[in-house]
Amino acid sequence: MKKIATAAGLAIAASLLLSACQPAATTAPPASDGGSAAPEVGFAADATIGVALPQKTSENWVRAEDMFNEGLSAAGFNKIVQFADNGVSEQQSQISAMVESDAKVIVVGAIDGSQLGDPLAAAKAKGAYIIAYDRLLKNTDAVDLYVAYDPYRVGELQGEALIEGLTAKGCNPCNIELIAGSADDANSTPFFEGGMSKLQPKIDSGEYVVVSGQTSFTQVATEGWLAENAQKRFDTLLAANYASATLDGVLSPNDTLARAALTAVETAGKPAIVITGQDSEVESVKLILEGKQYSTINKDTGVLVNKVIEIIKGLQAGTQPTPNGDPLDNGVIQVPVVYLDPVIVTQANVCTAYEGDTVVQKVLDESGKC
Ligand code: BGC
């Protein structure tokens, strides 16, 4: 990475980066021009960094909170790390307060990435650098970088795992059902579309049958990523469609919803199914060891948080991050991305997939199965 020492160097590097990643119309003036819209590059070593997290809808967010607190303190920054348990308007106020506190970088894991336009515009106007964390920020030009495990790739891996599990099961045709995440989360569509890119050809050929007929994103989305919503839908769906038919498999976007569907299947007294997941939550890793959940995804939160902190330290020193994927259209601009690779985990690799993740490794060590 190039270290930028002078104002002229900054202007050249910024314009090169922007011309590589964004249409000319969105090019911001470099900070050395005193332009209010330029992201801040190079700031005090003890500057304030804001981290706005969504609701605790899965373990990864809870772990991210601790890791951001520890990592930002260790790096010498003053930090504000907050959840928005009460929803979008709370998250909007939290970001506004971070702007008031003169945060130099604001990291946002959005509840609804389309609803933060105003506070993000205020952050941008003050020169803060805005990082979309895990979930893309949409319909705004006030986002500088998206850092995540590629969500479409997550969906593809889930689709492939479901096919692998159903092939091993030997059903023909296979009866499947689909679950998607919350419609307000920018990740839910790429997860679902990635999965469907693998499953749709098999549905079209008749190898797989979605017995409920619920195949559109809207029909299968789970409001708020809440387990109770997925479980309620599955209770109804099983009673209405599987009195005589056998459910073979389920595409689930994460572990929380996979466990909800498994509970509904068990409660209805139905036989075991092949089901996917994501997040490597402790309870789901145990279910994989027991053979009750087919797969999960390892998106190591520590690695993602450390990547973001490394980027923030670079910005502090005056170095722009290096995007590593195709920029993403967020409805207004092309957002540069830094992607990490998600890893599929099944019984075949569960024992070796979590080196470096002490929480999951402990579960594996104590299981007596690894
Ligand atoms: C995250 C997933 C998580 C879900 C629910 C998504 O945006 O990428 O890892 O399971 O939110 O919290």
Image: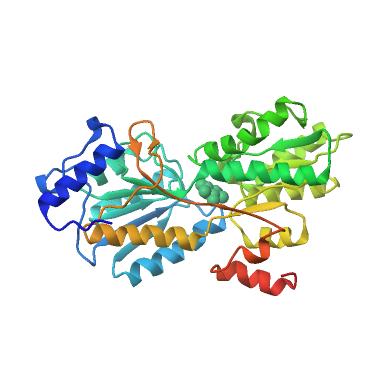
Residue at the (71%, 63%) spot, across then down:
286
Image location (x, y in percent) of residue 267: 81, 48
Q: Nearer the viewer, residue 94 or 277?
A: 277
In the rendering, at what x and y percent does residue 191 appear? 56, 40
Classify the position of the N terminus by image quarter.
bottom left
Residue depicted at 60% across the width and 31% down the height: 217
Please state if 199 lies on the left or on the right of 312 as rendered: right
Residue 175: percent from the left, percent from the top?
79, 35
The picture quadrant where one finds residue 23 is top left
In this rendering, the count of numbered labels is 0
Seen from the viewer's position, the closer of residues 320 and 40 is 320
On the image, the x and y values in percent for residue 232 come to: 71, 41
Q: Quadrant of residue 370?
A: bottom right
- Seen from the viewer's position, the closer of residues 153 and 115 is 153
In the rendered image, is residue 38 in sight?
no
Residue at the image position 61 percent from the left and 51 percent from the top: 278
Q: Residue furthest right?
A: 244
Q: From the viewer's perspective, is residue 94 above or below residue 167?
A: below
Q: How is the structure coloured here?
A: rainbow
Left or right of 166: which side holds 36?
A: left
Residue at 23 percent of width and 47 percent of height: 39
In the figure, is residue 5 to the left or right of 178? left
**Position of 48 relative to 19 (above/below):** below
Whether residue 115 is visible here, answered yes or no, is: yes
